[in-house]
Image: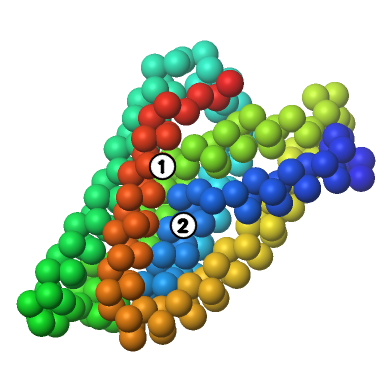
Amino acid sequence: MSLGIVDYSTFLIGTIFIILLPGPNSLYVMTTASRHGARAGARAALGVLVGDTVLMFAAVFGAASLLKLVPALFLGLRLAGAVYLCWIGLQLMRAAWRASQALRRGEAIATPEEEVRTGALHPFRSALLISLMNPKAILFFFSFFIQFVDPQAEYPLLAFLVLGVSVQLCSMTYLATLVLAGAKLAAAFRRRRRLAIGGTGAVGALFVAFGMKLATASLE
C-alpha cells in the first residue's frame, strides 16, 4: 500500500497486538457488558471509539508536539486522568463492598435494570473519558500511529485517514467481541452474586492500578 503510508502491514500487525493488550478501555467495556448487558456494553464501546477518534485527530494535528513543548500541560492531563481512573476503581470497589454487605444481611441488591433506570449508569460518558485519559491509547496515537505516514507524502491526510479507519475497524471488531462475551457473563453473574461481587471488586482494583500507571506515563 502506498498513499504515503510507510509499511502498512507492520502498522496493521502492531495495531492488532496493541489493541489486544489489556487496558482500561477494554476492561471497562467488558465490565459494563457483564454487569449491565449488551446494550450498555455497546454504549461503552461507542464511547471508546469516539474517544479514540478524538485522540487520533489530536495526534494528526500536532497535539503530541504541543504536549512535549509544554510539559506542565501533559502533567496536568496525566494527573487528571490518573485521578479519574482511580475514582472509577474506588467506586467499583465501594459498590462491591456495599453489595457484599447487603448480600450478607439478606437484603435486595439493585439489578442492572434498576441502576440504568435511576441514572446510576452512564457507560458512553464514562467510556469516553476513560478513552481520552487512557495511557495506552495516548501513547499509541501520539507515538506509534503518526510514525507510519511519510512526512513527504503528497496527501498526508489521506494516509492518516486510511490508517485511522484501519484502527477503528480493528477496535470495533475487538470491542464487539468483548460486548458479546460480557453479555454471556452477565447471565452467569445473575445466578452467582458472590462471583459478580468479587469480580467487580477485582476490576475496581485494576482501575486503581491503571490510574497509578497513568500517573507515571511519558510520551517518550
**Circles 2 and 1 in contact, beta carbons < 8 Å:** yes
Q: Residue at x 62, y 62 (%)?
A: 174
Q: Residue at x 20, y 78 (%)?
A: 110
Secondary structure, mark 1, is helix
Q: How many marks?
A: 2
Q: Is residue 70 visible from the viewing direction of this image?
A: yes
The picture places residue 30, in percent across and down from the top left corner, at 47, 65
* Residue sitting at the far left: 105
Residue 169, above or below 164 = below
The quarter of the picture where residue 104 lies is bottom left
Q: CA distance from mark 2 to mark 1?
A: 11 Å
**Residue identifier under label 2:** 27
What is the three-letter code of the residue carrying label 1?
Phe
Is residue 50 visible from the viewing direction of this image? no
Q: Nearer the viewer, residue 60 or 105?
A: 105
* Numbered badge on residue 125: none
Residue that numbered label 1 is attached to: 210
Q: Quick one: label 2, few (<14), some, or many (20+) residues within 10 Å?
A: some
Viewport quadrant of the C terminus: top right
Q: Is residue 46 left or right of residue 172?
A: left
Q: Which of the pair 205/115 is nearer the observer?
A: 205
Q: Label 2's element? A: helix
Query: With respect to residue 149, does 128 lie above or below?
Result: below
Q: Return the disc, 2 or 1, that comes first in the chain's sequence.
A: 2
Dot 2 amino acid type: Leu
Percent position of residue 111, x then y: 25, 80
Res 7 quadrant in image: top right
Residue 55 is left or right of residue 34, and the answer is right
Q: How many residues crowd mark 1 within 10 Å: few (<14), some (14–19), many (20+)?
A: many
* Residue 37 picture location, percent across and down: 41, 77
